[in-house]
Amino acid sequence: MSTPPESPERNPTPERNPSATHDPAAALSGTELRLAVFRLTRRLRSRRPVGDLSSPQLSVLFGLEARGPLSLGELAARDHVSAPSMHRTVNCLEEDGWVTREPDPDDGRKIRIVPTEAGIGAVRRTVKERDAWLQEAVDALPEEDRAVLAAAVHILDKLVRA
């Protein structure tokens, strides 16, 4: 039994391949851009050399590696999750040796979450794996597509800074 094709109502923005036309003036909708970025992000996040770490756990480690020690509340706000949810995530990371808890040097009543060397190593291995996968994918593209991507990187940076 074959499945019927998706109706336009269920898929209002059919995929198109702008690189197939090589027409830089081709119209690009915000939806198409969002979906392409979403798919790329999903592919990158699937690259996890440290297989036992979940996406939320990796997010915490990435935040700690980038910003240094943070409180549970700061981590929860950064990841847009509840404090109890972040507490569970940090407990798992601590049990597995990825983070430790230390008193805040400025306020002994507060506790800061600190990545261990193993936690920082997991972040660095993940970044290295993701960068290698993306570089391999980019290198496989035709030269003209790589040139378009190079320009697009700068444009995307402008979008996120606007």
Image (cartoon, grey):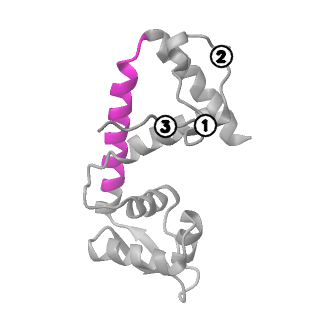
Precedes in sequence: disc 3 or disc 2: 3
Is 27 situated left or right of 87 in this image? right
Asked whether the viewer can see residue 104, the reply is no
* The stretch drawn in magenta includes residue 131: yes
Is 22 situated left or right of 125 in this image? right
Q: Nearer the viewer, mark 3 or mark 2?
A: 3
Q: Quadrant of the N terminus?
A: top left
Kindly identify the residue that appears in the image at 33 percent across and 41 percent down: 128
Q: Position of residue 90 (x, y in %)?
A: 40, 74
Q: Label 1: which residue?
A: 12
Q: Position of residue 45 (x, y in %)?
A: 39, 47
Is 39 situated left or right of 152 in this image? left
Q: Nearer the viewer, mark 1 or mark 3?
A: 3
Magenta span: predominant SS is: helix
Is 95 situated left or right of 141 in this image? left
The amino acid type found where label 2 is placed reads: Ala
* The stretch drawn in magenta includes residue 158: no
Kindly identify the residue that appears in the image at 26 percent across and 72 percent down: 96
Farthest residue to the front: give it: 1
Q: Label 2: which residue?
A: 26
Precedes in sequence: disc 2 or disc 1: 1
Question: What is the C-alpha distance between the residues marked 2 and 1?
Answer: 18 Å
The magenta stretch spans which residues?
A: 122-142
User: Image quarter for residue 119?
Assistant: bottom left
User: Image quarter for residue 136?
Assistant: top left
Tell me the element at label 2: loop
Question: What is the C-alpha distance between the residues marked 1 and 3?
Answer: 10 Å
The amino acid type found where label 1 is placed reads: Pro
